[in-house]
Image (cartoon, grey):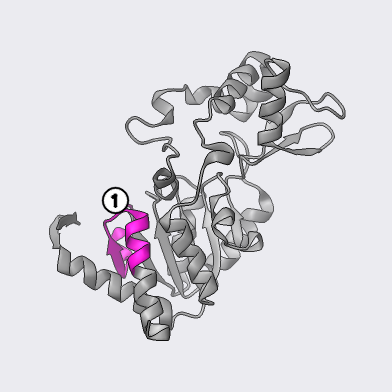
Amino acid sequence: MRQQVNGRIMQGEALEEQVERLAAMIVSARRVVVFTGAGVSTESGIPDFRSPGGIWEQYDPSEFTYQRFLGSAETRRKHWEFYRSGILGGEEAKPNAAHYAIAELDTMGKLDCVITQNVDNLHQKAGVPPEKVIELHGNMKWVKCLDCGQRTSMDEVVKRVDREGADEPRCDKCAGILKPEAVFFGEPLPEEALRRATYHSTNCDLFIVIGSTLVVTPAAYMPSYALKRGAKLAIINLSPTPLDHQASVLIRAKAGEAMTKVVQRARKRLYGE
């Protein structure tokens, strides 16, 4: 097996060395923060937004701004068509090997938290305690009324739309506009999630990026915060990122494959398994 990394060829043996090195770093770390992006979700069948063949090649991203959603009933109708299509997986989406490996880090007592750009709730499904999952871009599992604040599950709202045949569902309590709790373009990130993510990033000693190209800000600032405070950085991603040159470990492999190996090696070091 050969992999291209920073202009050089990485042989399979070198990849195994990187896996072993990351396992050793996890074992010696006190606070491990895991940062996940779309490259983790794609292995559960959820398409990426920006990659070739991704969601933005099928849908116009300008329709997904917060301002257009608020101001246009036609835009809201298109949104609900999108959610009903099941393209984001919904309740049918299942965690994959990467999600379970990250949850295993928590079982091993090594996981401080997961900071995620994903909105699919799969870290929680895999067994990471909800209080340890910081969702910078919100969560598609829930829908919130913009008038009265009532929260309803996305699955329940979609079923109601299908049952009633409505183009745009409204709050069954006050008839207000319903919006998914995922963050739209032009909408600020949840203030509390951003505060917590910044705090944990600046107080960890190992920051592991998995499946993110680190180009979407402000989420992509988190590993830089960790580096500035002296934490070690590991990156597992199939394509280059702006911080590759600062990573102590750089693994070009699929998230599930790499993390399964890393956790197996870490367990062996901890427990002799």
Check residue 76 for magenta coloring.
no
Check residue 254 for magenta coloring.
yes
- Closer-to-camera residue (228/89): 89
- Closer-to-camera residue (165/23): 165
Instruction: Check disc 1 and report its element: helix, strand or loop.
Output: loop
Asked if 214 appears above or below 180 in the picture, the reply is below
Residue lying at the far right of the rendered structure: 174
**Count of marks, rendered view:** 1
Residue denoted by label 1: 238
Q: Position of residue 231 (x, y in %)?
A: 44, 73
Residue 225 visible in the snapshot: no
Q: Position of residue 104 (x, y in %)?
A: 49, 68
Amino acid type indicated by mark 1:
Leu
Which residues, given as a range, are shown in magenta? 239-261
Residue 227 visible in the snapshot: yes
Q: Quadrant of residue 63?
A: top right
| Residue pictured at 67% horizontal, 15% vertical | 167
Quarter of the N terminus within the rendering: bottom left
Query: Circle 1: is it few (<14), some (14-19), or many (20+) Cα within 10 Å?
Result: many
Asked if 38 appears above or below 82 in the picture, the reply is below
**185 lies left or right of 159:** left
**220 lies left or right of 167:** left
Quarter of the C terminus within the rendering: bottom left
- Closer-to-camera residue (250/245): 250
- Closer-to-camera residue (103/2): 103
| Residue pictured at 54% horizontal, 61% vertical | 114
Q: Position of residue 183 (x, y in %)?
A: 60, 39
Q: Quadrant of residue 25?
A: bottom left
| Residue pictured at 66% horizontal, 48% vertical | 190
Q: Quadrant of residue 195?
A: bottom right
